[in-house]
Image (cartoon, rainbow, N blue to C red):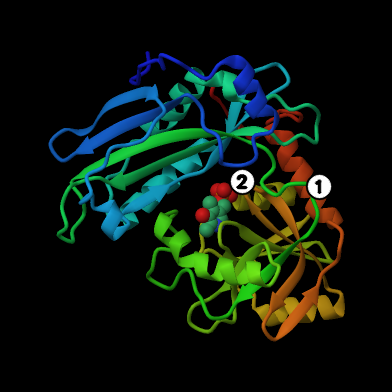
Amino acid sequence: MSTFELLKHAMPTPEPLREKILADSGFGKHFTDHMAHVRYTEELGWHGAQVKPYGPLVLDPAAAVLHYAQEIFEGLKAYRHADGSVWTFRPELNARRFNRSAARLALPELPEELFLESLKSLVSADSAWVPTPKDDNDEVSLYLRPFAFASEKFLGVRPSVEVDYYVIASPAQAYFSGTVGPVSIWVSQKVNRAAPGGTGFAKCGGNYAASLAAQKEAAEHGCAQVLFTDAAENRYLEELGGMNLFLVYEDGRLVTPALGDSILDGVTRRSLIELAEQLGYKPEERLVSLQEWKDGVASGEITEAFACGTAAVVTPIGTLKAPDFELQLGDEAGEVTMQLRSRLLDLQYGRVEDERGWLYRLA
Ligand SMILES: *Cc1c(COP(=O)(O)O)cnc(C)c1O
């Protein structure tokens, strides 16, 4: 028995319209018929778990989140396998990270069980919205977005004593449209997204708000994403606005910046580190400077670079641009990058055996 009470939508999206949306869903534009909701108050704790019709929220204009950005979120995907079953990937890592984010933003922690159950209850209600891949190159999924925010009506500055947790779901095609071509990355030298002691390791809306000016600058220079370096010296590589970074060395080393409190502990990053060893690569988590990257490309020692995250999976980096230099890394996706990418997708879509028990059944 689920703790989530199901309040069915009286007029769900008619099937022909749903099929039309699924055939060309884009990313993050369309949403399913339901959403999961759990409310927190100081007196009752988490309570009132429901899956109910998707729709606008009513918020008091003084709701704390609108003023002080006390908000966190997660992102994961539901994949339909060939036998019709629906699975997600290592959701317990997202549940734990959600609580690390909650602790940093002074929000109440959500029991891991409740997090997992919210995903399961929503996806069961909206399972018809999980797209079926046409073939092995069709990266369609149902993107799941859990989030929690301070909903108390109060303008004083302190942690909110009322919080709402929701999960919404959005059918998704590949994050970057077209084939898996390398993207251009802008090195932000004026704007930092995170600093020591800050919120960089937490998945919170505020980090994204802080990265948008750099994102805008990147777009003006024809770049799809931003690479952030450390806030103290702007010397060491950290990550992109929403993806972690890997450099591939000719000798089989796979280097990614070590996690500190300014880098997000990505599930994709962590999974690639574990898969890389099995595929014969040597993963290294350590400090990496921008200079090491430049020198490595010049000497031929660094052969590929890629970004990774749930939304965009593994994305090859083709060009690195900054106000004072431009580094060409190749106009085709690298071999190692594509091998890791396929390996991960094969696992997620159930095309290879799940030896590590990373998949979690939702429907
Ligand atoms: C979500 C996110 C990532 C990627 O994490 P995954 O768990 O792999 O999806 C990387 N960096 C930032 C800043 C993020 O918000």
Q: Is residue 20 left or right of residue 134?
A: left
**Residue located at (73% from left, 76% from top):** 293
The kind of residue on which mark 1 rests is Thr
Place of residue 185 in the rendered image (x, y in percent of width and height, measured from the top left): 69, 67
At horizontal 66% and vertical 48% (from top left) the residue drawn is 312
Residue 363's spot in the image, x, y percent? 55, 19
Q: Is residue 141 visible?
A: yes
Classify mark 1: helix, strand or loop.
Answer: loop
**Which dot marks residue 109?**
none
Q: Is residue 79 above or below residue 173?
A: above
Residue behind mark 2: 311
What is the x, y in percent for residue 181? 81, 54
First in sequence: mark 1 vs mark 2: 1
Spatial separation of the CA atoms under disc 1 and disc 2: 15 Å
Tell me the crowding category of disc 1: few under 14, some 14 to 19, or many 20 or more residues within 10 angstroms, Cα based. Answer: few
Which image quadrant: the N terminus?
Answer: top left
Q: Residue at x 43, y 47 (%)?
A: 73
Q: Amino acid at mark 2?
A: Ala
Q: Are marks 1 and 2 in contact (CB under 8 Å)?
A: no
- The residue tagged 1 is 179
Q: Secondary structure at mark 2?
A: loop
Tell me: is circle 2 under 8 Å from ligand 1: yes
Q: Quadrant of residue 41?
A: top left
Q: What residue appears at the point 45 percent right and 66 percent down from the top-left corner? A: 210
* Residue 279 visible in this rendered orientation of the protein: no
